Image: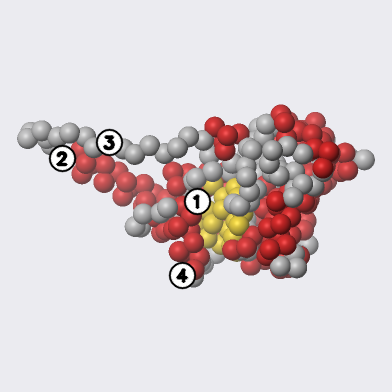
Amino acid sequence: MNFEENFTSQDSLSEKPKLEKQPIAQNENFDDSSSVDLEKELEMIKKEDAIKLAEIRASLGLEKFNPNKETQQYLKNYLELKDGDIERLGLLKTKDLPKNYQKQREALNDKRLDDVNIAIIPDDLWVKGSQPSESDAENNIILIKQSYFETKENPDEIAWMVHELTHCQTFLDSATPEDYQKNMEKFAFDDLKTEYSYPNNPVEQATFTKQFQFLKEEGKNREDIVKMISNYYHEEDLPFFNRILDGVYK
């Protein structure tokens, strides 16, 4: 899934505009201790996140990776981070992913992907709803929801990491960034045209093909994949996925 696309996923269609919080009237006897407690609670959450990320780094044998100014500014802008929030994020290179993700990286057999940035985003800062990951290939970065990344039981069972890394690979294979963008805006299968070119475009055709091929090699049957992908997309998108599955399971 890519930042630039016109999503027809479950979350994008049901997403509602953000509402501005209304100021709460206060009287002369107002006790501001509750706001102080809230600030303490938020500070505690930040510390707990930092501890969790430190534990992840320690378990992986990693040194802390400090993002450059451009990456920091990109994350601040995209996630609308407040002061101090950037410190709660984890950031590592694809080559340093945990063992349970390395098989997906190795499946693509592309050394160019080793230095793609993986940003681990605390759940309360995540902006894509139930979608657990997304990529911005042009900025060489993949974002993944922290709770999804830390899952111990069947981690990334649907292989979103293969999907996101294939976005980066497809971008690198494109003659120009404009070509990559154009391929997201045209249809992959003309007979399956809908109002939007997502997910029915050549870029997503490539990413979902690699994702489904990996899942097949991992022992998933066609019905397993349809069931899993149906948790993220509407029924109207299934003809596109079935067309790809026809090729994978031919």
Q: Is residue 21 left or right of residue 121?
A: left
Numbered badge on residue 69: 4
SS for callout 2: loop
Earlier residue among tags 2 and 3: 3
Earlier residue among tags 2 and 1: 2
204 or 98, nearer to the observer: 204
10 or 214, nearer to the observer: 10
Numbered badge on residue 32: 2
Residue to which mark 3 is pinned: 22
Of the residues tagged 3 and 4, which is closer to the observer? 3
What's the CA distance linking mark 2 and mark 1?
31 Å
What's the CA distance linking mark 1 and mark 3?
28 Å
Q: Quadrant of the C terminus?
A: top right
What's the CA distance linking mark 3 and mark 4?
34 Å
Q: From what the image shows, is residue 26 above or below residue 104? A: above
Earlier residue among tags 4 and 2: 2
SS for callout 4: helix
Earlier residue among tags 1 and 3: 3
Q: Position of residue 196 (x, y in %)?
A: 68, 41
Within 10 Å of disc 4 (Cα), the crowding (few <14, some 14-19, many 20+) is few
Of the residues tagged 4 and 2, which is closer to the observer? 4
Residue to which mark 1 is pinned: 121
Which residue does the image show at 78% across and 62% down from the upper left? 109
